[in-house]
Image (cartoon, coloured by chain):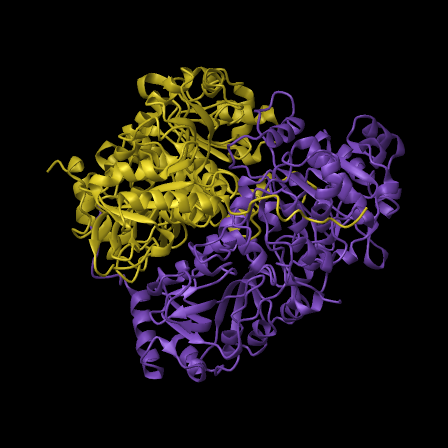
Chain colours: A purple, B yellow
Amino acid sequence: MNAFTPDLAAPRWNRLGAKRDAALARARAVSPTREIPPERIVELLEAVIEPGDRLCIEGNNQKQADFLARALVQTDPRRVRGLHLVQSVLALPEHVDIIERGQVERIDFSFSGPQAGRLARLVEGGQIAIGAIHTYLELFARYFVDLTPNVALVAAQAADRHGNLYTGPNTEDTPVIVEATAFKGGIVIAQVNEIVDVLPRVDIPADWVNFHVRAPTPHYVEPLFTRDPAIITETQVLTAMMAIKLYAEYGIRRLNHGIGFDTAAIELLLPTYGEELGLRGKVCTHWALNPHPTLIPAIEAGWVESVHCFGSEVGMERYVAARPDVFFVGADGNLRSNRAMSQAAGHYACDCFIGSTLQIDLQGNSSTATKGRIAGFGGAPNMGADARGRRHASPTWLKAGAEARAPGAMPRGQKLVIQTVETFREQMQPTFVETLDAWALAEASGMDLPPVMIYGDDLTHVITEDGIANLLLCRSAEEREQAIRGVAGYTPVGLARDRQAVENLRDRGVIRRPEDLGIDVRRATRDLLAARSIKDLVHASGGLYDPPKKFRNW
Amino acid sequence: MNAFTPDLAAPRWNRLGAKRDAALARARAVSPTREIPPERIVELLEAVIEPGDRLCIEGNNQKQADFLARALVQTDPRRVRGLHLVQSVLALPEHVDIIERGQVERIDFSFSGPQAGRLARLVEGGQIAIGAIHTYLELFARYFVDLTPNVALVAAQAADRHGNLYTGPNTEDTPVIVEATAFKGGIVIAQVNEIVDVLPRVDIPADWVNFHVRAPTPHYVEPLFTRDPAIITETQVLTAMMAIKLYAEYGIRRLNHGIGFDTAAIELLLPTYGEELGLRGKVCTHWALNPHPTLIPAIEAGWVESVHCFGSEVGMERYVAARPDVFFVGADGNLRSNRAMSQAAGHYACDCFIGSTLQIDLQGNSSTATKGRIAGFGGAPNMGADARGRRHASPTWLKAGAEARAPGAMPRGQKLVIQTVETFREQMQPTFVETLDAWALAEASGMDLPPVMIYGDDLTHVITEDGIANLLLCRSAEEREQAIRGVAGYTPVGLARDRQAVENLRDRGVIRRPEDLGIDVRRATRDLLAARSIKDLVHASGGLYDPPKKFRNW
């Protein structure tokens, strides 16, 4: 056989470039300039989007390319059709409207909280195929492999005349979307709030962007991470005290918190209960976290050295800008967030992830998926998974790994993955279940696997008002099951515990009750919170935090 | 207790900004402009670097900020001292010279191949403390948490008068280094090959960069990924045939290859043996890979849909630019690589990682670490680890997961992690060992854990000239050990196999010999390679590939 001789004539090598050139030529008929008049935007979308294109409508956790999304649902469904949506969040009604209009064939995404019910109905009705539900970094990774967008519709604060973009604090997903699209023959269209002569800083270079349009209204931003301290319960104060005891035990310095009230309570106990325990500088110094308003008291009390943010938070802009030693801030004085890099930080550079969930089964698998809602898990799977590629040691990681290792096994560290829950959630639904609702959802929606948020073999601790179960110390599936039952309170799962086994586990320190941890439960009152209202947070910030109207009641 | 009241006066919140402002003021005394005359560069470094600073000298796999590294070793050790190096690669002699000069206290890095011996001697002599050896993405993640550089010395192809940077095809680590440094009060200095009026494209915006300097010589680039087909052995052809059978069995479409000759052989068999098996379009379509010259024949034969690159490869520039449907190419016509995003792609969007190693133990732990060399593992730990945060399914991932799951366990997919090795390596050293040399290295260097490249519980298959061991199908540590012994040939580990156990494993398909896979070993000759020399690769590229001189022998 001879050495391989290529047929250089046969394949064409620039189909993507030719496709882009043709789209740009069609676009020139709509507007000869890269700045598009807002009233021509529907025409522009019809000119550049081809049937079957992979399309990303920037829908972040927070920032939304809402003007472009509204324009998209005004396009002619005979022209703009067969789309494959590849975007992290389906948040706006228009994201689902475009599906209902029959213009979308397939979606790959990470989170669809507000639209989860509508989406489930469309899937059950066979109107849409779900490729998969990803964790954010996984979806971004696929942008560079097999889900590269052909067209990206993104949002920024401002553009200059050349088309350079300034995102302001909500940089979020924009860099990764634009990079993947611009460098693989795609087209990038940005909506901006304003067009200026000189940008405060450049977040996205102009030659990565094809068109920009000044939207008639500023892009929508959702204050998704604001938790009003007024709503935190005394049970949440108790579980937060237990969490802080765990932080002390493992010396957890680098971590990520979920976005619930359970973890907001922890943030608000650091400058009070944590201070009492002498933990300042010893735990919670480095974070991958959005600028949670409930972190303000801990920052002001000198607990926090560094916070890298996935996105920003409405009302936190001035506060963040005034704390550049803590946050990542540009020469313009504003936050630069970056969801891709913050997810990488959460995965590889944090020793602990703690969050909440709706259901936990007997093996410790947990999920927020419920029948009739296809919501996804956002960043939790990435941060709530042991980072098996990690090779750097920290005392926290080594201690967790040493607890988990069987004798004779290769030594290795482990990430702490903690679920903090109440045994019953709203309407007295038990959090602990024999079978996750995820199984029924998978069945109804034709998924390959039940949508599990955090797998039991990645979970290390469960905290409830009943105590802490340390799953690292369990040596069999049976022990694990009893450890979980042992903190499941009066739920059916808890009541079915083997009392003797649970007492043995308590003797071994696998299960610890609040009193075993030296916690006086009578102190678990709201008085222990460093801020008990949004107003307290504003005060703690020295007036720099400017909460959205819906959180102001004074 | 009252709600927390902050002491707004006590902490200072802009120490980093003040530090940067002071450094910039000192720099202005060296040069009033952001373009620094090359002869003033040592002075500039002395002006901006403070004792104890975290410093990143951009040392990539390939591109090196070599002019700045040479300048650094000319600085006054009384002024520039106590540094903490945080950079992915220690490749240049200067990277270690600066340690020997006593200017560095601590290093955190990923790979130090060329300097591994010198580094080990410095560690053993107590002259340097190693923070940790990371996988790339893990180190980048820490840039945003607890290893943010204070000063970054980076390399680019060109700057314009404003200070915007163009990296050319070797973008590599630059974006992630600069982003972390520039947005946390740090200083960025770029060496460039040329200063031009208009850049072909902007890779790094000017307001993320403080200074640029035109280096007297172009930055060094190492052709690290060029494997001469002339050196591929017939044993490697045989193991490559087995690997392709495995690719067919699992339908592996999205993957990453290591950089050895074993995997180069696979690349060169795709258009011949793979074609014969009818696999085009069914396997190896999407890659996270540097532009390996040995992939040219497969690309030309129409096997490859997409390749995202960590970096570039010397001589491949024109070829890549001519294949923009396959590679990520900018409007300027050149590759845009990005190590951070390609590592994310390798972790989360690939179904398979295959590479080679120096040693494998009885549990399947593997390492390239040997006593007297502290080298690190680069990207292998990140890509050779099961991505437990992954939630999207593919047939490949589901099949691997189904093989691995115990009955009753929550179903889950799994990444294929394959080691392909010869049973003996150079100088008849056995690849299979009872105890990894990593244990002795850890002891000698005071490491917390033995430096394992890929952990046994992440490894799914071992390929040797003896056959394939499928570790997914092993149901106990004993089975796993016998499966590994069963493909370990005439090494002491192989000779100590339990013959009956190994035959049982073969009956169950856990071990498969070449003949079990339908491979005629007589066909495993170099004739099967699609290119048998660098010259063949140039021919296959239609003359677009321009190999470095050292690979030209015609």
**Towards the viewer: A419 or A429:** A419
**Towards the viewer: B156 or B483:** B156
Q: Quarter holding the N terminus of chain A?
A: top left
In the rendered view, would you say B51 is above or below B30? Answer: above
x and y percent of residue B338 in the render? Answer: 37, 49
* A158 to the left or right of A119: left
Q: Is residue B59 visible?
A: no
- Looking at the image, which residue sits at the far left? B554
Image quarter of residue A114: bottom right
**Towards the viewer: A32 or B450:** A32
In the rendered view, would you say B126 is above or below A498? Answer: above
In the rendered view, would you say B427 is above or below B235? Answer: above
Q: Residue at point 72% right, 61% down?
A: A371
Q: Quarter holding the C terminus of chain A?
A: bottom right
Image quarter of residue A346: top right
x and y percent of residue B53 in the render? Answer: 42, 35
- Count of all numbered marks drawn on residues in the image: 0
* A251 to the left or right of B192: right
* A6 to the left or right of A113: left
